[in-house]
């Protein structure tokens, strides 16, 4: 919207005064057409990108957008501005699933990048459904997207207006240009829809490298050199860095030390890490330093956004999670210039084998369960004991890819 825009947090309403003698062109969300109107009207909006997920949207505050005619009676009752903002604003929610590391990127940070980047940091970020720990977690990215300090929320000095807190002080925030909601996601997971923007995941990954001052742009390229007699020397001039993502609770490796030992014998320099114990900056630096990452399907693999180009992602897929493994992590690697390998466990490698007989429906027809039961069995109560003999060729293949 462009013109006279007033945000009233107490009324959870955005007022837009229709420019006189013109039509107001409003660009609506994913599945709606552009709307042209010259009459007063209003509608509601939840400014969160996962619009196709009712459960996520139920966790997002609903706001009204009310169009006001300059000649109508409503104009006389508009709230008066108490804080006028010169830069344009981008209005979005940190609700929904954004507390989850994966959804924080897929539903908020990537769409926020697509929406805010065209303003070249000359923009204010207006946040509802604020979560202080979440704001602190992503403050480096917020600072890289916006340069104006409009409001200091919990003493974080960067470009973010906490609309929720404005309800306490009665402020009316006024803008001459405002974007409500985030674009760019479409129906892509951990990606950017080419139908909505010219930005790509390559642009986003470059933005992250710049934001966190990450130095490594490409994974190591292994060589095999020959000596004077033509015999092969040590095939690895430098040890490739391998990170094993360790999880707490469900979908954890039960023999992570054995996996690390085998990888070390193959020539990797191995680190076992728990991303949950690290800040975003620490995770970014750690992941950017490595050439191969190994992890069981889960939110920790989202950190692949920080990997250097041509790095190898090895996803270990627990029982019954093939579809989500493909959609959430395999497909996105194609747009990130990463190589992808997967290792599908057998039922003997799943902790479920200790609780159910081999011919149980848990193993034969997992799709027969309703979602909540499926989630409880396969996502919340399944760990992995990798068969080292079966897994070894996957790590060898990763080495081969680093030679390409």
Image (spheres, rainbow, N blue to C red):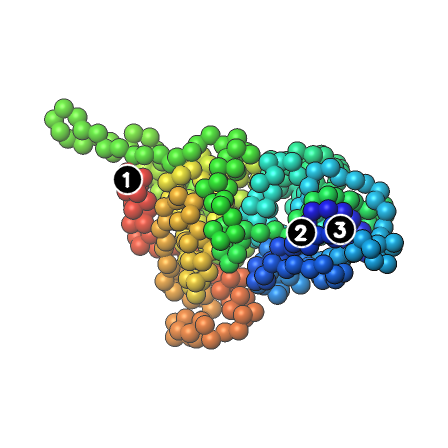
User: Where does residue 32 sit, x and y in percent of width and height?
Assistant: 59, 62
Residue 345, image quadrant? bottom left
User: Where does residue 127 sit, x and y in percent of width and height?
Assistant: 70, 47
303 displayed left or right of 347: right
Label 1 sits on a secondary structure element that is loop
Give the mark toward the camera: 1 or 3.
3
277 displayed left or right of 362: right
Residue 365 lies, with reference to residue 404, above or below; the image says: below
Q: Determine crowd level at label 3: few under 14, some 14-19, many 20+ residues with C-alpha closer than 10 A.
A: few
Earlier in the chain: of badge 1 and badge 2, it is 2
Which residue is located at x 38 percent, y 36 percent?
Answer: 219
Label 2 sits on a secondary structure element that is strand
Label 3 sits on a secondary structure element that is loop
Q: Do the residues labelled 3 and 2 touch (CB within 8 Å)?
A: no
Cα separation, mark 1 vs mark 3, equals: 62 Å
Residue 280 lies, with reference to residue 316, above or below; the image says: above
User: Where does residue 50 sit, x and y in percent of width and height?
Assistant: 58, 58
Q: Determine crowd level at label 2: few under 14, some 14-19, many 20+ residues with C-alpha closer than 10 A.
A: many
The residue that label 1 is drawn on is: 404
Earlier in the chain: of badge 1 and badge 3, it is 3
Q: Which residue lies furthest to the left in this view?
A: 229
The residue that label 2 is drawn on is: 180
The residue that label 3 is drawn on is: 20
């Amino acid at each position: 919207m462009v013109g006279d825009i007033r945000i009233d947090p107490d009324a959870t309403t955005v007022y837009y005064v229709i420019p006189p003698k013109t039509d107001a062109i409003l660009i609506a969300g994913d599945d709606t057409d552009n709307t042209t109107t010259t009459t007063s009207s209003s509608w509601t909006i939840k400014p969160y990108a996962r619009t196709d997920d009712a459960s996520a949207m139920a966790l997002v505050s609903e706001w009204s957008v009310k169009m006001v005619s300059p000649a109508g009676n409503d104009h006389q009752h508009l709230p008066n501005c108490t804080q006028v903002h010169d830069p344009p604003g981008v209005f979005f929610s940190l609700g929904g699933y954004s507390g989850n590391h994966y959804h924080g990127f897929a539903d908020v940070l990537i769409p926020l990048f697509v929406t805010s980047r065209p303003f070249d940091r000359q923009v204010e970020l207006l946040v509802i459904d604020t979560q202080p720990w979440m704001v602190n977690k992503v403050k480096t990215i917020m600072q890289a997207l916006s340069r104006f300090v409009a409001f200091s929320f919990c003493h974080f000095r960067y470009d973010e207006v906490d609309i929720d807190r404005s309800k306490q002080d009665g402020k009316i925030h006024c803008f001459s240009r405002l974007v409500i909601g985030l674009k760019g996601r479409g129906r892509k997971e951990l990606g950017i829809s080419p139908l909505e923007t010219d930005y790509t995941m390559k642009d986003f990954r470059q933005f992250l490298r710049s934001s966190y001052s990450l130095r490594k742009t490409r994974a190591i390229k292994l060589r095999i050199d020959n000596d004077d007699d033509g015999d092969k020397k040590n095939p690895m001039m430098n040890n490739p860095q391998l990170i094993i993502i360790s999880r707490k609770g469900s979908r954890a490796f039960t023999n992570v030390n054995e996996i690390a030992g085998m990888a070390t014998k193959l020539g990797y320099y191995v680190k076992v890490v728990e991303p949950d114990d690290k800040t975003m900056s620490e995770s970014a630096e750690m992941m950017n330093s490595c050439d191969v990452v190994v992890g069981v399907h889960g939110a920790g693999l989202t950190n692949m956004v920080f990997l250097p180009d041509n790095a190898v992602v090895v996803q270990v897929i627990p029982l019954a999670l093939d579809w989500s493994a493909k959609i959430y992590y395999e497909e996105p690697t194609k747009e990130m210039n990463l190589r992808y390998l997967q290792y599908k466990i057998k039922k003997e490698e799943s902790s479920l084998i200790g609780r159910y007989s081999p011919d149980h429906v848990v193993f034969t027809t997992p799709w027969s369960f309703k979602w909540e039961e499926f989630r409880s069995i396969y996502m919340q109560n399944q760990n992995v004991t990798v068969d080292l003999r079966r897994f070894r060729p996957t790590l060898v293949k990763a080495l081969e890819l680093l030679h390409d």
